[in-house]
Amino acid sequence: MKRRTMLASAMAAGTSLALAPLMAQGQMEDPGEASPTTERENMTQSTPQTGYADVNGLQMYYEIHGAGGVPLVLLHGGISTIGVDFGAILPGLSASRQVIAVEQQGHGHTGDIDRPLSTAQMADDTAALLQHLGVEQADVLGYSVGAGIALELAIREPELVRKLVFMTLIVDQTGYYPGHLEGMAMIEPEMLAGSPFAEAYAAAAPNPDDWPVLIEKIKTFAAAEAGWTAEQIEAVSAPALIIAGDSDIVRPEHAVATFRLFGGGVPGDMMGLPASQLAILPGTTHITLVQRPEWLLSMIVPFLDAPLPAAGT
């Protein structure tokens, strides 16, 4: 029990690997919220356009849902897929805009190649995919590992990113609770047997036997990623909506500090509302964050639909 408790509090790197101890403790589903199975069923209510793009040595899988408006790019978390992470909110997001969802190297339908995982490389892959699709500017929503990819994309390709939505963004390792990285190093593939992540991988991956390879690559990725400096973040011009659970893997004070780096933390009645926004969802963990479609859609859609602030404000 001691080891299980430690793992539950120590899942790291902004990945969805926190599921393993949650399943063991019977905390996988939130009463009254959509289950992962329901999320995948919701997503299949509309038939997306799907394809593969030859980018940076990858055959990178993507889906396009809906039409119109500024495109919205969805970036999933570690060891996960489009359906597992975004199945609950995809119908609402694509009701009035085009949504482009991608699967990163070694995840879901996108096969692995002989190179390590890194935020910088996955951001470059995403940019290359959008260029392949002829997308010149987009809003970007990232969850967990995908949130880091979204930030890196905004830093590397500022003209490409109009607005950002971060769901569990960890700027550097101080954002984790103590013990997260140590817990990450202890994860083994069998701990995730029967989970939605393992099942989705088995169903979609070109080489399902590579599941242990992905787990090892994510563990190495978690230990190697250093994050970003305050100066790098403050230079990002795109407004950001920062979302986290109050019992997420990111410390709430880290989310607040990140909000300040994006121009938040001012008395709005006196100075006006900042372009960026912060939401801490009550009673919400890292895994159950994506299972709250009503809350998420009520925040994300208005944020994306609002006009950009005038230059210089």
Image (cartoon, rainbow, N blue to C red):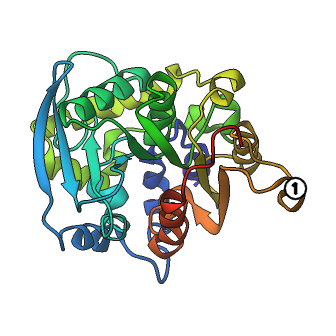
Residue 90, percent from left and from top: 32, 64
189 left or right of 274?
Answer: left
Using the image as rendered, state which of residue 233 and residue 1 is in the foreground: 233
Query: Badge 1: few (under 14), some or many (20 or more) residues near its Cα, within 10 Å?
Result: few
Give above or below for 239 relative to 116.
below
Residue 101, percent from left and from top: 28, 49
Using the image as rendered, state which of residue 66 and residue 229 is in the foreground: 66
Residue shown at the point (15%, 59%) measured from the top left: 48
Residue 126, percent from left and from top: 31, 32
Residue 240, percent from left and from top: 59, 46
Which residue is farthest bottom? 32
Using the image as rendered, state which of residue 138 and residue 46 is in the foreground: 138
Q: Secondary structure at mark 1?
A: loop
Give above or below for 227 relative to 30.
above
Residue shown at the point (58%, 21%) measured from the top left: 226
Name the residue beneath numbered marker 1. Answer: 267
25 left or right of 136?
Answer: right
Give above or below for 23 relative to 217.
below
78 left or right of 310?
Answer: left
67 left or right of 28?
Answer: left
